[in-house]
Amino acid sequence: MLSYFQAIVIGLLQGVTELFPISSLGHSVLVPAWLGWDKLVTAQSADESFYLAFVVALHVATALALLVYFRDEWVRIIRGLFTTLRTRRIETADQRLAWLLIVATIPAGLTGLALEHALRTLFAKPLAAAIFLTLNGVILLAGERARRWSSVHQLAVEHGRTHSEGGEEGRRLDTLDLKEAGVVGIAQIGALFAGISRSGITMVAGVVRGLDHEDAARFSFLLATPIILAAGVYKVPDLAGHLGDGIRTQALVGALFAGVAAYLSVRFLVRYFETKTLLPFAIYSLAFGLISVIRFA
């Protein structure tokens, strides 16, 4: 049904592609299709399947890896949230970030509950995933181009901060208002389509609002944590029920590899986006997407 080798490969794939802006859902469709794992490809878009139960474990492991990496920040954010509930005022950056995350989580959370199943069964197929992965590349390129717009530059200047030599000029994350956080959250809905990256599209939304790549990535990773964890926990009954029969051990192995890969990925990406851009990921998405369109058309 699902070999340990497949579990390890898919676990590593999930851990990396969930955080790299290249779409974990798209790769979970395309890579098995390229490798000839047809049962897994078919199961991806099925109403119910063992593969989806397996993916639940990978999502939980990825979210836990993010929680571990950002543990100190989450402690400050949660403490800040409870402080604002008590005082009914937002006075610090951590308090503001708590509410930005809440507002940005709502659109994707509600839409995911309503449409995730329908969109997955309709679009989690190789050709559709290849087309959306190509579109993901276009979105990332558009985000990089938007950095040059005068309006974006003005936002960065008005709400900017001083960086070390060679650093990127950008707006402070705690200067975003709640409406802008809502826009970032709405952008995250695009990740329900296999091939569109959650981290990529939210980073682009942040960059368009004047954030530098470092803060856009940080906000994206923090925002992804409750969404991924909630989705995984919500689907845990699938793994505990009959759909998990015969794959629970493989799910544990895959989750271990996904968690390690996710932790190493976020550690790398946080440093990468201190000085680098989305351009390499845009080129990759366009190249792999177009090649896959040709292959599965």
Image: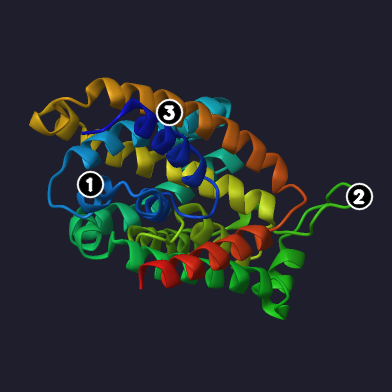
Camera sees residue 187: yes
Q: Quadrant of the N terminus?
A: top left
Q: Earlier in the sequence, mark 3 or mark 2?
A: 3
Camera-side mark, 2 or 1: 1
**Nearer-the-camera pick, 207 or 261:** 261
**Nearer-the-camera pick, 10 or 96:** 10
Q: Earlier in the sequence, mark 2 or mark 1?
A: 1
Q: Left or right: 110 with respect to 95?
A: left
Residue to which mark 2 is pinned? 165
What amino acid does circle 2 point to?
Answer: Glu
Q: Which residue does the image show at 39% across and 38% down from the upper left?
A: 10
**Residue 166, position as x, y percentages in the image:** 88, 52
What amino acid does circle 3 point to?
Answer: Leu
Q: Are marks 3 and 1 in contact (CB under 8 Å)?
A: no
Query: SS at mark 3?
Result: helix
Q: Quadrant of residue 241?
A: top left
In the depicted structure, whether residue 110 falls above or below residue 132:
above
**Nearer-the-camera pick, 64 or 73:** 64
Camera-side mark, 3 or 2: 3
What amino acid does circle 1 point to?
Answer: Lys
Number of the label disc, if any, that sits on residue 8:
none
Residue to which mark 1 is pinned? 39
How far apart are the alpha carbons under marks 3 and 2?
34 Å
In the depicted structure, whether residue 109 falls above or below residue 76:
below
Camera-side mark, 3 or 1: 1
Residue to which mark 3 is pinned? 64
Query: SS at mark 1?
Result: helix
**Residue 70, position as x, y percentages in the image:** 55, 31
**Residue 128, position as x, y percentages in the image:** 33, 68
**Residue 247, position as x, y percentages in the image:** 22, 27
Q: Earlier in the sequence, mark 3 or mark 1?
A: 1
